Image: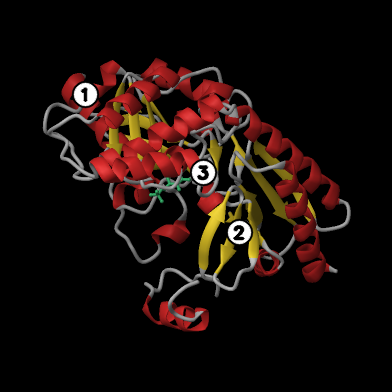
Amino acid sequence: MTTVATDTLVALGRRTISMNYAPAPVVLERGQGARVWDTEGREYIDLLAGIAVSVVGHAHPRLVAALQDQVSKLLHVSNGFFTEPQVLLMEALTRLSFASRVYFGNSGAEANEAAIKLARRYQRVVRGTPRFEVISFVHGFHGRTYGALSATAQPKYHAGFEPMVPGFVPATFGDLGSVEARIGPHTAAILVEPVQGEGGVVPAPDGFLAGLRELCDRHGILLIFDEVQTGCGRTGRWFGYEHAGVAPDIMTLAKGIAGGVPLGVMLATEEVSAGFTRGSHASTFGGNPLATRAGLEVIRIVEEDGLVARGAELGERLRSGLSGLAGRFPIAAVRGLGAMTGAELAASPEQTAQVIAAARERGLLLNLAGSTVLRFVPPLVAADVDVDSGLERLEGALGSVFG
Ligand SMILES: *Cc1c(COP(=O)(O)O)cnc(C)c1O
């Protein structure tokens, strides 16, 4: 129970929230696993997980206990000191990935800022080249700060915020020729999502990431994978790059990595990391004991409970259910990788938004990617029944819009 009536909270929220947001008229109060409840006691199946964040679900007892313990001991210290959760999380991330150095920030955008800054610094300071340009991809998404936004080659996110930061060059996702055509003497790095998430859940075509690796090696360019959405077991591997059989030089993580506590991570090889000389970059909150304790516990839970494989199973179940609905409703394509799924509707953006609202009214949370893609990024702990009941509720929602 809240102390203030739901209608009052919604009205007050609508009057005071920054106008870039337009929340549904729902006040969420608590969660358990893949379910959440609002202040009116209505239950929702959460196949969105706070946009690929709550990988171990809501109120996971181990995460709750770890955070309570950490809060009671030490909440924050500066990066002038080590803490145990910070060091153990860096150890875990370097053990699980290609990388040997770890930088912590507080969000995906910040992790990408760090990656872009490191790429430029490495080219300039370590290699002594004049390279500063970053090639990124149309329909990609890298965050809303100016550097990350400039790398996000989607005009709708730039409108009215220009001028963008110079030095970002858009290429076509999946088209190696378009990348090669944009490589020049100033190219410092290529920044790419292994599966474009916000752009509509579009996995890189076979061979594309390996082809980028080859181009980078040939031209002395760094390869940066933005795994803010695809990392932490989301795609059925710990990191999306593992599907491609090649590793990047720099990788960014955020969303799922600390199960809902804000944490961004930028990982790099030993050599590239040398671009960040002492004092060249920093974050006050980045890597604080609370956030890193959360990250460490999430990794332990995912490893010990086999959640990477579990997530892949969930995704298969969901995609086969969605394909089953495609015969009766205008679902043009069902795609994804592991526990990351998109269902593209052959419908208008308005109808797609109506499906999402109708699903919510029936107790199912999902959201929009691209303009007509329903996105499902469930907690990796979801039960089969969560997926099956979610599909039933979706069927009702599709029927109400297209029936
Ligand atoms: C969500 C997302 C970001 C931005 O993360 P924030 O935490 O919102 O700054 C960056 N890159 C990708 C691939 C994302 O999905």
For disc 3, the marked residue is 60
| Position of residue 8 in the picture relative to residue 128 (left or right) | right
Q: How many marks?
A: 3
Q: Secondary structure at mark 2?
A: loop
Residue 403 pos. (x, y %): 85, 69
- Residue at 49% x, 81% y: name it: 5
How far apart, in angstroms, are the residues tagged by discs 2 and 1? 40 Å
- Residue at 48% x, 24% y: name it: 212
Q: Earlier in the sequence, mark 2 or mark 3?
A: 3
Question: As rendered, which of 80 and 316 lies closer to the eye?
Answer: 80
Residue 390 pos. (x, y %): 73, 54
Q: Secondary structure at mark 1?
A: loop
Q: Earlier in the sequence, mark 2 or mark 1?
A: 1
Contact between marks 2 and 3 (CB within 8 A): the answer is: no
> Which label number is shown at residue 129?
1
Question: As rendered, which of 191 and 329 lies closer to the eye?
Answer: 329
> Which label number is shown at residue 371?
2
Q: Earlier in the sequence, mark 1 or mark 3?
A: 3
Q: Nearer the viewer, mark 2 or mark 1?
A: 2
Q: How crowded is the residue under tag 2: few (<14 C-alpha within 10 Å), some, or many (20+)?
A: some
- Which residue type carries mark 2? Ser
How far apart, in angstroms, are the residues tagged by discs 1 and 3? 48 Å
- Which residue type carries mark 1? Thr
Say if 263 sits above or below 329 in the image: above
**Can residue 134 be spotted in the picture?**
yes
